[in-house]
Amino acid sequence: MLIIDIGILIVFFINHNCCNTDKDMYNDNLVKALASGQVEISDVPDITKLEELENPYDAVERESLERDEDYIWDAAYYNQKYYVYFGALPAILIMVPYYLIRKKLSATSTVTLLFSLLSVPVLVGITKKIFEKYFKELPFKFMALSSLMMVLGTFLIWINVAPRFYELVTVSGFFFAILGFYLVLDSENKENVSYKKIFFGSLSLALSVACRPTQIFSSLLIVPILLKIFIKNIKEKRNIVKNIVVVAIPYIAIGLLIMAYNYLRFDNPLEFGEKYQLTVNNMQKLTLRWITLPTGLLCCLFGLPTFQANFPFIHANGNIIDTFGYFYVEDMPGGVFFLAPIAFFCFGIIWLWKKSKNKDLKIFSTTLLVVGLIFSSFISLKAGNTGRYLLDFAWLFVFTRNYNIYGDFKEFKNRRRKENIRKSI
């Protein structure tokens, strides 16, 4: 954990002293807007030229305009006002209070660093909890190695190479998602169930959606755990209502707040502003193009970089197959299985189901893999691929790999033990 933290800090120090920018649409415009009690951002370009376009959401039509002078790139434009599409929770929790107290803007890179460092002990805690639950007999070195691979496989260091508000909302959503997962995972033990941990775990998972809407898929991770507890409560005829309430209240409360925020901006509680975004695609017409799914999965999971003779020798590769039409790719150094090859063993899940007798482990490992595939598929269909998106789902494949291999190792040790007993007899 210390090694990873030092690595993240070194990357942050290099970035902060050579590449960091003081102001951006998020830590400046949004923070000042929220601090003044409004949701639309001010200090924006004159909208005259933007309104003269037949369709301002069409990137081709906007080529005649000057970015920053005539419109704000990646902002949401609705009803002649600008809004920030990206989740506001990091701004509300940290940046706005800092601005109100210090009268200064907080650097996006610094807040990104904070969430990155906070994520490391949570990932280690999840690994420790799973080892205590499924692999008690394995030596400590296995857990230590798994924790190291786990954190490296999340691409937290990559997120801090050149953090912008894109990376900020991604890593903050990731932090709240894994924190919620850890709390719910830690709520279950042999003696009793901690409904307080389930409540705060559900709250944290709900908050992750306020950072990044696609983090709603992370809530699927706790379904098998909650279902197991719920079935047990039904059989014992106790805590059934309590079980439902501690999960429902956080999601309903945060959901209503998000819907109110959406309504204030876009007159629709279910609209996050995606279709009003001034970005590379015409979001008014962009739909889930299932035909591009093979390209997306190939890119984010199996993509290879370009190898060149000049430093750093490995470079991003934008030359992906275009058989299925246009697919957006940005600064992708490679797919998950190239950047974290150990994750490829997640497909050992097939062996685990055939050989392991631990039903809970099989369900747990399968859930991780399925959620990872759902995440990567949805992002490929809806948003294209870029390096920061790997943080959403790469850890799930690495996690699955860990427990497939250790499940295999555990079964191997059990077979060897039985063989030795038979020989001694």
Image (cartoon, helix red, strand yellow):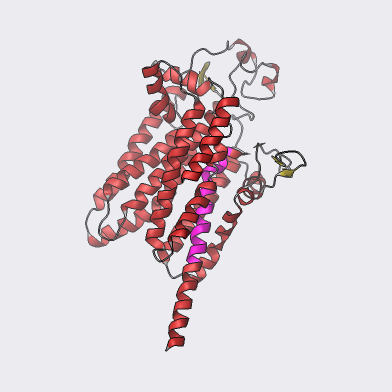
| Numbered marks: total | 0
Residue found at the very far left of the displayed protein? 238
Q: Is residue 50 above or below residue 198?
A: above
* Residue 177 painted magenta: no
Image point (50%, 51%), residue name: 148
Q: Position of residue 131 (x, y in %)?
A: 41, 59
- The boundaries of the magenta stretch are 388-408
Image point (43%, 30%), residue name: 90
**With 396 as the anchor, is 282 left or right in this view?**
right
Q: Position of residue 329 (x, y in %)?
A: 66, 38
* Residue 407 painted magenta: yes
Which quadrant would residue 74 be assigned to in this image?
top right
Q: Is residue 309 above or below residue 27?
A: below
Image point (45%, 36%), residue name: 115
Task: Note whether residue 396 is visible.
Answer: no
Q: Is residue 232 above or below residue 414?
A: above
Assign the magenta stretch its main secondary structure: helix
Which quadrant would residue 321 be assigned to in this image?
top right
**With 106 as the anchor, is 347 left or right in this view?**
right
**With 66 as the anchor, is 112 left or right in this view?**
left
Q: Position of residue 41 (x, y in %)?
A: 48, 17
Residue found at the very far bottom of the displayed protein? 425
User: Which of the pair 383/193 is nearer the observer?
Assistant: 193
Image point (57%, 54%), residue name: 343
Q: Position of residue 237 (x, y in %)?
A: 22, 59
Task: Note whether residue 394 is visible.
Answer: yes
Q: Considering the image in quadrants, where does the C terminus appear?
A: bottom left
